[in-house]
Amino acid sequence: MISWLRAHGTLAGAVLIASGLTAAFGYVAVDSLLGAVDPSRLDSDFTRSALGMGGIRDSQGIGGAASNASAIIGVAIGAVVILSLIIVIGLAFRRDWARETGAVIYGLLGLMSFAVSLGGLSADPPAPSAWVGMLTGLANVAVVVLLLVPPTSRDFRNRARGRPAKVG
């Protein structure tokens, strides 16, 4: 077990972090889609913000605007979750395309998380969830770093050559 971790530790770390991010955002996507089906599940602050952004001023359109916003969020996050799941499976099987795609996608997700979180931190008062976004951005960057370090490169190169991974 120890020798396996030495040989594949950086890749295993990247897969574990990426899997955790995928599971967390999968929950958010499912919860958003359930909110679209049943608007009573939605947070009242979210409903008010959807009402204000949608330009609906009567009480009859509140549920519809919030439900539509929740559906859009659920579909967008769900698409990212499906892409992330494909990448994680590819990384687990040490496919070159997954390493390259994972570095790009998780890098972009990290940059987006940092950008959105900085907006939340600079608000007056700061958004309470902004720090969660910063941690999400750091986790995405950690995946990218783990995918690009030399031990991971050697692991993928050895797999492509059909050699077992070298320990040490």
Image (tube, rainbow, N blue to C red):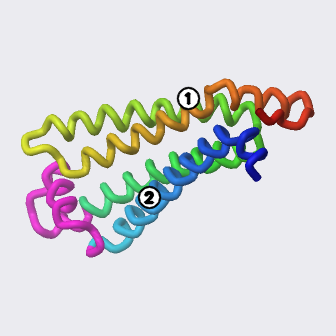
Q: Nearer the viewer, residue 71 or 106?
A: 106
Q: Is residue 69 above or below residue 108?
A: below
User: Image check: 96 left or right of 133?
Assistant: right
Q: Main secondary structure of the magenta part?
A: helix
Total labels: the figure holds 2
Residue appearing at x 67%, y 24% in the figure: 150
Residue 39: image location, x then y, percent: 29, 71
Under tag 2, what secondary structure? Answer: helix
Q: Nearer the viewer, mark 2 or mark 1?
A: 1
Q: Nearer the viewer, residue 16 or 44?
A: 16
Mark 2 — residue?
29
Which amino acid type is shown beneath numbered disc 2?
A: Ala
Q: Is residue 43 magenta?
A: yes
User: Image check: 28 left or right of 43?
Assistant: right
Residue 62: image location, x then y, percent: 18, 65
Under tag 1, what secondary structure? Answer: helix
User: Image check: 136 left or right of 116?
Assistant: right
Q: Over which residues does the magenta segment extend?
A: 40-64
Residue 91: image location, x then y, percent: 69, 42
Mark 1 — residue?
104
Q: Which callout, 2 or 1, points at the residue further toward the start of the chain?
A: 2
Q: CA distance from mark 2 to mark 1?
A: 22 Å
Residue 6: image location, x then y, percent: 72, 40
Residue appearing at x 47%, y 33% in the figure: 141
